[in-house]
Image (cartoon, coloured by chain):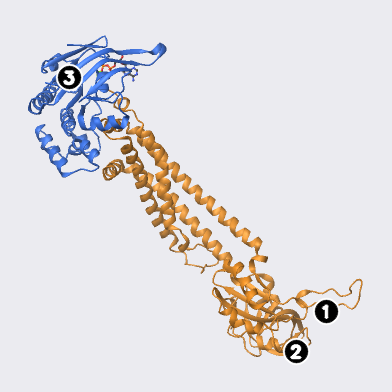
Amino acid sequence: MLYALKIAGRYLTASKAQTGLLVMGVAVGVFIFIFMSALIGGLAELILSRTVGDIAHVSIQAEPEDPALLLTGTPLLVQQKSTTAAANLPTATNFVPLIESLPGVRAVSPQISGSGFITHGAQVAQVSINGLMPGRESAITNLDSYVVDGTARLGAGSILIGKRLAEDLNLLLGQSVRLSSTKGIETALTVTGIYQIGAGGLDRRTAYISLGTARTLFAMPQGLTRVEIKLNDLYAADAIAPQITDLTGLTAKSWTVDGAQFLEALSAQAKTGVLLKSFALITIVIGVASALLLSTYRRRPEIGIMRAMGASQRFVVLVFVLQGALIGLMGGLLGAAMGYAALLPFPAGGQFRTGSLPIDIRQGSYGLAIALTLLGAILASIWPARAAAKVDPVEAIGQ
Amino acid sequence: MSALVVVQDLVKTFGAGLTETPVLRGLNLTLQAGELSALLGPSGSGKSTLLTILGTLMQPTSGAHQMLGQDLVRATDSARTAFRNQHIGFVFQFHNLLPDFTALENVIFPAAVRAGRETGVARARGMDLLTRMGLQDRIHFPTAHLSGGQKQRVAVARALMNRPELVLADEPTGNLDRASASQVMQLIAQINKDEGTTFLISTHDEKIAALCARQLVVVDGQVEG
Ligand SMILES: Nc1ncnc2c1ncn2[C@@H]1O[C@H](COP(=O)(O)OP(=O)(O)O)[C@@H](O)[C@H]1O
Ligand SMILES: [Mg+2]
């Protein structure tokens, strides 16, 4: 092994330019592999943080109580779910600390939500109202990160509205508005924050108030309409949701129930990544195999000499496989270093600047890239190595 | 003297059908231990074919080939590989040395490939052999920087590395000028005398053959002499 390694190394250093080119070729393949890993990983993270990152991973929602229809036959009234008076989860408040204590749960947000109208001067707009617990405004949707004016902190008498709505109503920070619920209760609030979320509708539609204000507004002295739960690992939602249901007797729903399509898209993207990375690996394997095959042809007389001097076929195989392994190792290390250097300018983990590629340097899969390249190069060298071992010494020496 | 190599009724035929070429036709030969023999014959008579069979690099079509009492016709490829590593040395006309290695590295190759590494003992013997070949100041030269005669002397040193009983040399001087050729032959004769190594040297040069104690001639696929 040691001696075969010496000879393999000597063969590689004997033709430095050729070996250098080959190692460079492998390194480029590894570079592409790493770049794709970082890009696909970063993209998935970006999509997750911009979508699933801002939604509840598990939610407990009261079934809206349809008002009993007194009329039989064709109902005259068509209900819109979001505008119904909020349904109540009378016991939910008690379960909040319990859910919070579950392993894997990062944050719990008790909420009272419903619909209403916001009035500023002569202007009126319909809004969906979301009552959040002060101090937990950013537990689910990271409102703090979206606030463009004022603060996300909610207190008694404060309201956080979207930028579009503010523009529609000519509202400025610090101005006061009147908010009335579908229960017919009205209260005066001060605009303490204005947020802007890229996704269009939300900015115009949703207003956030404190849980206490929502209680008054929806005449709900107890209970909640919804409990939203954020997990450490969003993929644990399917396991934790039934656990919460068992524990509380309330129906807890995992985000995957409605997010199936989204999950599919993510997995399709991951598959594309695997495909692209496989192509990079195949390129490496073909490159190493053809280079080594050429080398076995070029070194036929030497192989003949070695065999005549009593080198076994196994030894010849080892010499060529070790050449492949050395090329794979050097190309892998060089490619990983190149990949790392190229990814350095991109901000780490999640802090993607808009307009730049969502590349995550931590997701370069450097070790995997090196290991797979090494493995690929070894596999690629087996065929040429066996061809070398089968060289007939008499023919090769050509006396 | 005892018989080192015994060959009986050796037949080697290349090709089949229209291209069938019988080269060795029932050849009988015995080499005694310690003999220095020349193998003569015109080009194409089968000298190289006989040497490669004696060197276990090629299997005969039929016949018996024994060395040191071992049946080498029936042996497996790996057994023959190990056998020639330990008991047979080669010197070829062309393609003799590994070009990317130094003189010393070439000389100790047979020992290193056997041990799996280059040992200090092997290195010492390699240097001693190179010194005996008059190459003490070329030990660490890359072989590409050596003259033809120097290369053949390195090849002789390598052939002796594992102290083989038999050294087969296929026209070792065919590529050399007269002075280098006689230098190589004198070294071979010296080793044969000092260590009793058996040599079989193919050549079509009568002057070279005259330096050997025994002259064998390949005629019509048989050996005379
Ligand atoms: N592998 C081979 N296939 C076919 N014919 C061969 C082969 N090797 C040698 N021969 C033929 O065998 C004959 C003897 O060759 P060789 O042993 O090289 O002779 P010499 O070494 O005496 O010049 C030649 O006619 C040659 O063409
Ligand atoms: Mg010949």
Q: Residue B44 placed where, x, y %?
A: 27, 14
In the rendered structure, find residue A67 and report the number of the disc placed on it. Answer: 1
User: The numbered mark 1 sits on a residue in which chain?
Assistant: A
* Horizontal arrangement in the rendering, residue B204 relative to residue A22 (left or right): left
Question: What color was chain B assigned in the picture?
Answer: blue
Residue type (three-letter) at the residue carrying disc 3: Leu
* Horizontal arrangement in the rendering, residue A210 relative to residue A385 (left or right): right
User: The numbered mark 3 sits on a residue in which chain?
Assistant: B
Nearer to us of marks 2 and 1 is 1
The residue where tag 2 is placed is A186
Say what secondary structure mark 2 lies in: strand
In the rendered structure, find residue B31 and report the number of the disc placed on it. Answer: 3
Question: What color was chain A assigned in the picture?
Answer: orange
Ligand 1 occupies quarter: top left
Q: Give neighbour class at mark 1: few <14, some 14-19, many 20+ (Cα, 10 Å).
A: few
Q: CA distance from mark 3 to mark 1?
A: 115 Å
Instruction: Write down the quadrant of residue B106 in the picture.
Output: top left
Asked if labels 2 and 3 share a chain, the reply is no
